[in-house]
Amino acid sequence: MIRRLAVASLFAFAIHAGAAGLRPFDAQSLAAIRAAEAGKPFVLAFWSTTCEPCREDMKVLKAAQRKFPGVRVHLVAVDPPSERATIESFLRRYDPGRATRWAFADNFSERVRYAVDPAWRGELPRTYLFDRTHRAESVSGALTEPELLRWFARQAR
């Protein structure tokens, strides 16, 4: 029991340890994020280095998280694992702020996408807004700043 608590605590610390570093995102990662964010709202946003609207979404998410720091943002690059250097360069250039950074760890992206949402076909940007109970609202396409700020404000109450 103590060992399981220690392992869970270490994992939660790793998720919340800050934005630096690119974490591997696989089919089990969403469950781990949900466990680490238990009772708290969070955003899970999927993007790619080749997705133009994703760049704007990063700016909107960064601004929202700056205004509402109690809502954590998790950014997940869907690019192949072989593109890690490109992903890291992109993140340095577009600086998503305090967001936790992840990248697909599996070349079989369909398996990872299915684990997140069986209805998701790969369109980007794809964002999931999880409230305190972890009921998710999915958004395909670009986020609008006023709408996102309203959601963040509701979660901050």
Image (tube, rainbow, N blue to C red):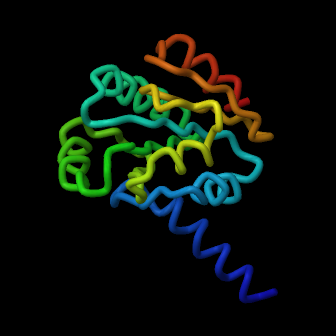
Q: Please indicate whether residue 71 sits to the left or right of residue 34 in the image.
A: left
Q: Please indicate whether residue 52 sits to the left or right of residue 42 in the image.
A: left
Q: Is residue 55 above or below residue 133?
A: above
Front position in the image: 8 or 124: 124
Q: For the N terminus, which image quadrant?
A: bottom right
Q: Residue at x 49, y 34 (%)?
A: 65
Q: Please indicate whether residue 50 sits to the left or right of residue 14 in the image.
A: left
Residue 113 at x, y percent in the picture: 54, 43
Residue 138 at x, y percent in the picture: 62, 26
Q: Residue at x 73, y 79 (%)?
A: 5
Q: Please indicate whether residue 127 sits to the left or right of residue 153 in the image.
A: left
Q: For the C terminus, which image quadrant?
A: top right
Q: Is residue 128 above or below residue 111?
A: above
Residue 89 at x, y percent in the picture: 18, 47
Residue 64 at x, y percent in the picture: 48, 27
Front position in the image: 157 or 101: 101
Q: Residue at x 54, y 50 (%)?
A: 111
Quarter where residue 20 is shown = bottom left
Q: How many tags in the picture?
A: 0
Q: Residue at x 72, y 88 (%)?
A: 3
Q: Is residue 151 above or below residue 107?
A: above
Quarter where residue 23 is shown = bottom left
